[in-house]
Amino acid sequence: MQLRSDLIRGTLLGLIILGIGGRLLMRVIAHMEGRVPAFTPGGSITVVFAGTVAGALSGLIYTLLRRFVHKP
């Protein structure tokens, strides 16, 4: 049960912070460099998906560390 909640939390945080936040930051950087910023569906989906997967893996690593690494 704990694995599922950690995985869900990690996935949601990855989606919001890494995925959507990363995509918005890419747009800000394009503005700062003087480029014409553009959202492409393929690029946006790739960045959001990668952030979501990274968050899910982080949640899994957190669960494993909490289970096997005990406080001294």
Image: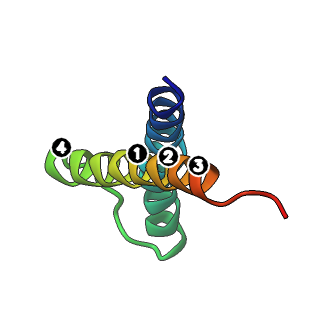
Give me the disc on residue 42: none
Circle count: 4
Q: Residues within 10 Å of mark 1 (few under 14, many from 20)?
A: many
Task: Kindly indicate whether the residue at mark 4 contacts the one at mark 3 (C-beta within 8 angstroms).
Answer: no
Q: Quarter of the image for the C terminus: give it.
A: bottom right
Residue topped by disc 3: 67
Which percent across, then down, holds residue 35?
A: 38, 71
CB atoms at circles 2 and 1 under 8 Å apart? yes
Q: Mark 3 against mark 2, which lies toward the viewer?
A: 3
- Which of the two discs, 1 and 4, labels the residue nearer the N terminus? 4
Residue 16 drawn above or below residue 37: above
Of helix, strand and loop, which one carries label 4?
Answer: helix
Cα distance between the residues tagged 2 and 1: 5 Å
Q: Write down the residue under mark 2.
A: 59
> Which marked residue is nearer to the observer: mark 4 or mark 2?
2
Amino acid carrying mark 2 in the image: Gly
Q: CA distance from mark 4 to mark 2?
A: 27 Å
SS category of the residue bearing label 3 = helix
Given residues 49 and 70, the one toward you in this image is: 70
Numbered badge on residue 41: 4
- Disc 1 on helix, strand or loop? helix
- Point out the tag, 3 or 2, that comes first from the N-terminus: 2
Pointer 4 or 2: first along the chain: 4
Q: Residue furthest bottom?
A: 33
Residue drawn where x is 53% and y is 35% of the image: 6
Q: Is residue 65 left or right of residue 71?
A: left
Between disc 1 and disc 3, the foreground one is: 3
Amino acid at pointer 3 = Arg
Identify which residue is drawn at 23% across, 45% down.
45
* Spatial CA span between label 3 and label 4: 39 Å
Q: Position of residue 30 (x, y in %)?
A: 43, 67
